[in-house]
């Protein structure tokens, strides 16, 4: 059996000696404690589930992407849909259809990024999982080698989906994890 190793650089680091605490559930306990502090200071902003800017942002789940800060967004401005690679999958189309048809979004912004882990694995990942657990995943890995081309493919998937009524304002970008800048991708290139 082979295994796929994803080598990625991150801006965060794990303090020396903290691996045991992470493995023992201390991280979840820290998150729950942080929520307690948040809830103590929380007041209902009186918002609706409809995003103020009528935009849905589809992006990679990479921990280095702070989308709200990078895009100047505030709570309530957008719907955020994240997955490995920021790829437009059937589930992303499902979320976008709900976002547009039930909650009023009219534009879609797609954000992939440099140094993405999805550029380092292949569809063999599914085969390796099947060998390990005895069942082949029903989903595709959606790995890619060319981030610009994958953004174009994702834009095309949104623009051609029969389930999405608003496909005229779809733009795609690559976020540079070293500079924090977005680079727009020409869908026709």
Image (cartoon, grey):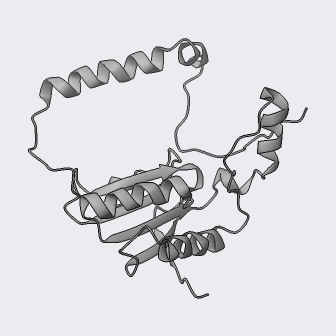
In the image, what residue occupies the spot 61% across and 87% down? Answer: 189
Horizontal arrangement in the rendering, residue 50 relative to residue 121 (left or right): left
Residue at 46% across, 20% down: 27
Q: Position of residue 88 (x, y in %)?
A: 54, 61
Whether 15 is drawn above or below 82: the answer is above
User: Which quadrant, please, contains the N terminus?
Assistant: top right
Frontmost residue, 72 versus 107 = 107
Q: Is residue 73 visible?
A: yes
Horizontal side of residue 69 vs 146, given as left or right: left
Number of numbered markers: 0
Viewer-proximal residue among 55 and 165: 165
Q: Is residue 173 above or below residue 25?
A: below
Q: Position of residue 162 (x, y in %)?
A: 47, 72
Image-based side of 102 in relation to 20, left or right: left
> Outermost residue, bottom direction?
188
Place of residue 175 in the rendered image (x, y in percent of width and height, measured from the top left): 50, 64
Direction front: furthest residue: 162
Q: Is 4 rendered above or below residue 70?
A: above
Picture residue at 76% right of the left edge, 39% below the top: 136
Q: Is residue 69 visible?
A: no
Residue 38 left/right relative to 21:
left
| Residue 157 image position (x, y, % from top left) | 55, 71
- Determine the image quadrant of residue 43: top left
Q: Is residue 160 above or below residue 62?
A: below
């Amino acid at each position: 059996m082979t295994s796929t190793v994803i080598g990625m650089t991150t801006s965060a680091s794990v303090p020396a000696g903290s691996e045991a605490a992470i493995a023992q559930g201390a991280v979840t306990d820290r998150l729950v404690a942080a929520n307690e502090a948040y809830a103590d200071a929380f007041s209902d902003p009186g918002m609706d589930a409809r995003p103020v800017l009528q935009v849905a942002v589809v992006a990679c789940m990479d921990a280095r992407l702070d989308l709200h800060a990078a895009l100047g967004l505030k709570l309530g401005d957008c719907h955020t849909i994240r997955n490995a690679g920021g790829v437009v999958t059937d589930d992303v189309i499902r979320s976008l259809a709900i976002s547009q048809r039930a909650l009023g979004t009219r534009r879609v912004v797609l954000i992939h990024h440099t140094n993405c882990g999805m550029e380092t694995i292949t569809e063999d990942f599914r085969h390796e999982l099947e060998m390990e657990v005895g069942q082949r995943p029903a989903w595709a890995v959606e790995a890619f080698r060319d981030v610009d081309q994958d953004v174009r493919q994702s834009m095309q998937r949104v623009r051609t989906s029969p389930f999405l009524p608003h496909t005229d304002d779809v733009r795609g970008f690559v976020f540079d994890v070293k500079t924090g800048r977005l680079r727009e991708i020409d869908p026709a290139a």
